[in-house]
Amino acid sequence: MLAKKAPNPTDKHVGARVRMRRMMLGMSQEKLGDALGLTFQQVQKYEKGANRIGASRLQQIAHILQVPVSFFFDGAPSLPGQLSDGLTEAPSPAYVADFLATSDGLALTKAFMRIEDAKLRRRIVDLVEQIVAAGER
């Protein structure tokens, strides 16, 4: 039996960003699959990073999801030794993308962004931080 190969971190990240954007638009995997001429299972494999998305397919997905191709790489993990202005770039916090890819994370973010009062938003963040701190005691 062959050992299952773990998805490449960049493929996982791109897939998570596809999922996040699809969910932001309220689009099902089936609807995205139909637009691409694929099954929802294939979309699922892309979103999990199990299958790599080719360049032309990624361009097609970007068009359907109404974002530039670069959107899928925002916050992507750096390759080992990848340099930016002579410095090694620190990997971005993947937990943010993971959180936004959940239905709760997306719902919370959408609702939070509809709060226009910046002071109220700050008070909500303070409240959540206090709840976390109380739970850690």
Image: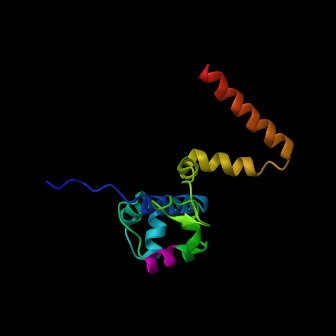
Question: In the image shown, does 136 or 102 lie closer to the viewer?
Answer: 136
Q: How many dots with numbers?
A: 0
- Secondary structure mainly formed by the magenta segment: helix
The reply to whether the magenta stretch includes residue 33 is no
- Across and down, in percent, residue 98 comes to 53, 49
Q: Quadrant of the C terminus?
A: top right
Q: In the figure, is residue 37 to the left or right of 5?
A: right
Q: In this rendering, is residue 126 above or below 56?
A: above
| Residue drawn at point x = 57 percent, y = 53 percent | 92
Examine the image and state in which quarter residue 64 appears: bottom right
Residue furthest top as drawn = 137
Q: In the figure, is residue 50 to the left or right of 31?
A: left
- Across and down, in percent, residue 127 comes to 74, 31
| Residue drawn at point x = 58 percent, y = 49 percent | 96
| Residue drawn at point x = 80 percent, y = 36 percent | 123
Question: In the image shown, does 32 or 48 lie closer to the viewer?
Answer: 48
Boundaries of the magenta span: 55-61
Q: In the figure, is residue 127 to the left or right of 83?
A: right
| Residue drawn at point x = 77 percent, y = 51 percent | 114
- Across and down, in percent, residue 80 comes to 45, 59
- Across and down, in percent, residue 66 comes to 61, 73
